[in-house]
């Protein structure tokens, strides 16, 4: 797998288990890319949904994509603190076209006070049946929900405010 270069603008593409395109973020600036992680940043980027609807992000965000973990993390920098949106999904890959992952519906929203909420369990159950998720995949995702909650509680990686502050400062200096 080729990795993007620091400073490069890339597209992020989210797919569903059946291979259909789910969502596209038009432009994210690469801050770090190696065999384990791709960290990026964007602000006011255009997002296109599978139905063609387009919208623009409202705040700067630091993005964290792992090539090994079954989740990715969006750190949204707002006036009242950092909010996190965590997507349970396949490990990220990168090719000449975009950074890509499969979105598996389950999400965790984390608030500045570190409280969190698991979202979209109904959507996950529906797609699990409709797209015939294998039991092994179901176990992987459930284990990664637990792993992600542990990261939140321990303020590991992106959940450490210094992580977000340092990468945002680097982004603004580019």
Image (cartoon, helix red, strand yellow):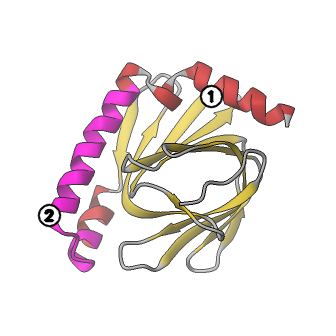
Q: Is residue 128 left or right of residue 81?
A: left
Find out whether the residues at labels 2 and 1 contact each other: C-beta distance under 8 Å. no
- Front residue of this view, candidates 156 and 152: 156
Q: Secondary structure at mark 2?
A: helix
Residue 117: image quadrant is top left
- The vertical placement of 154 against 1, above or below, is above
Q: Quadrant of residue 102?
A: bottom left
Instruction: Report which residue position mark 1 lands on.
Output: 164
Left/right placement of residue 71 relative to residue 65 reads left
Q: Say which element carries label 1.
A: helix
Quadrant the C terminus occupies:
top right
Q: Is residue 13 visible?
A: yes
Q: Would you call the spot at circle 2 few (<14 residues within 10 Å), some (14-19), or many (20 or more)?
A: few
Check residue 104 for magenta coloring: no
Residue furthest to the right = 173
Q: What x and y, as percent, mark residue 115?
A: 40, 28
Q: Which comes before the other along the chain, label 2 or label 1?
A: 2
Q: Which residues are magenta?
A: 127-152
65 on left or right of 26:
left
């Amino acid at each position: 797998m080729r990795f993007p270069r620091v400073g490069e603008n890339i597209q992020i593409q989210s797919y569903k288990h059946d291979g259909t395109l789910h969502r596209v973020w038009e432009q994210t600036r690469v801050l770090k890319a190696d065999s384990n992680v791709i960290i990026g940043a964007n602000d006011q980027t255009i997002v296109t949904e599978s139905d063609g609807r387009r919208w623009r992000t409202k705040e700067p965000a630091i993005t964290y994509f792992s090539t090994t973990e079954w989740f990715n993390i969006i750190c949204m920098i707002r006036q009242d603190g950092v909010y996190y949106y965590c997507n349970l999904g396949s490990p990220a890959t990168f090719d000449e076209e975009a950074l890509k992952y499969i979105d598996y519906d389950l999400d965790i929203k984390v608030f500045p006070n570190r409280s969190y909420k698991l979202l979209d369990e109904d959507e996950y159950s529906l797609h699990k049946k409709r797209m015939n998720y294998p039991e092994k995949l179901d176990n992987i995702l459930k284990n990664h929900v637990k792993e992600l909650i542990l990261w939140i509680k321990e303020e590991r990686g992106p959940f450490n405010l210094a992580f977000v502050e340092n990468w945002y400062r680097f982004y603004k200096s580019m």
